[in-house]
Amino acid sequence: MKKTTLLLILCCGLISMTDARAHGLNMTSANITLRQHNHLSLTLATSLTELFHQLEWQGKPPSIAHLVADEAKLAEFHRQLVQVFAEQLTISIDGQSLASRQTRAPSQAQLKQRLEEEIAEALLPPSPKTQEHTHGPAEHEDYQTLVISIDGFMPRAAKAEMLDVHFPPALGPVLTNYSEPRSQTLTPGADGSSLQIGLKH
């Protein structure tokens, strides 16, 4: 496999993995993976409630409860979400857009169900475990209530030297993780074969 250098440039909020403090982070996370056959996938998890507060559009209701009660406003919120992830979140390789890109977001019905669940959870009395963390950050999995998947292929003409992902400001700080396959064939000698991988860059 040809060795390439992939530099991830985050235009909105670059967070170092070494600065992360494990499970209590209230932020968006993005897992980017380069798979075989130049297939690139991005799985993004963020707060649906926070997105509602960050996004602005004409006729925006004052609360999520008002949003769920009005199908027309819910449809507009769904359209705004799709626009953020399909248009404002951009991915390019060597300045060229991702080929055959697919953006998978929840349907309007799924979005409504998730919002109703959040309203119900907000109305429930806090459990003893929740009370212990009242003054601390919310659990990571409790914050990330919206998952979006994006995938596509590297353009054939690209040299695969630079990966550029632009996250819209509505997503706030973004914790990123990038991985790619590293494979090679080992030819055994008299003493067998060995695999050596540099772990620090």
Image (cartoon, grey):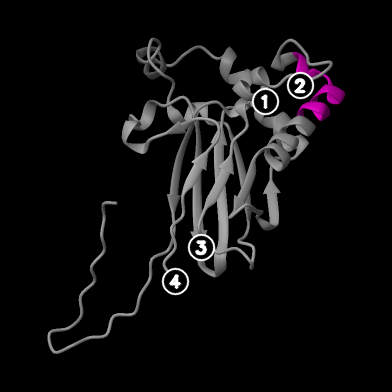
Tag 3: amino acid: Arg
Secondary structure at badge 4 equals loop
Secondary structure at badge 3 equals strand
Q: Depth check: 84 or 43 in front?
A: 84
Main secondary-structure element of the magenta-colored stretch: helix
- Say which residue appears at 57% left-offset and 62% top-offset: 39
Tag 2: amino acid: Val
Residue 192 point in image, percent of width and height? 17, 83
Q: Which residue is mark 1?
A: 115
Q: Which residue is mark 4?
A: 2
Tag 4: amino acid: Lys
- Which part of the image, by quadrant, shows the N terminus? bottom left
Q: Which residue is mark 3?
A: 35
Q: Is residue 62 left or right of residue 8?
A: right
Furthest-bottom residue in this view: 190
Give the distance between the C-alpha atoms of the residues marked 2 and 1, in whole angstroms: 7 Å
Q: Which residue is mark 2?
A: 68
The label nearer to you, 3 versus 1, is 3
Secondary structure at badge 1 equals helix
- The mark nearer the N terminus, 2 or 1, is 2
- Say which residue appears at 65% left-offset and 55% top-offset: 98
Q: Depth check: 145 or 80 in front?
A: 80
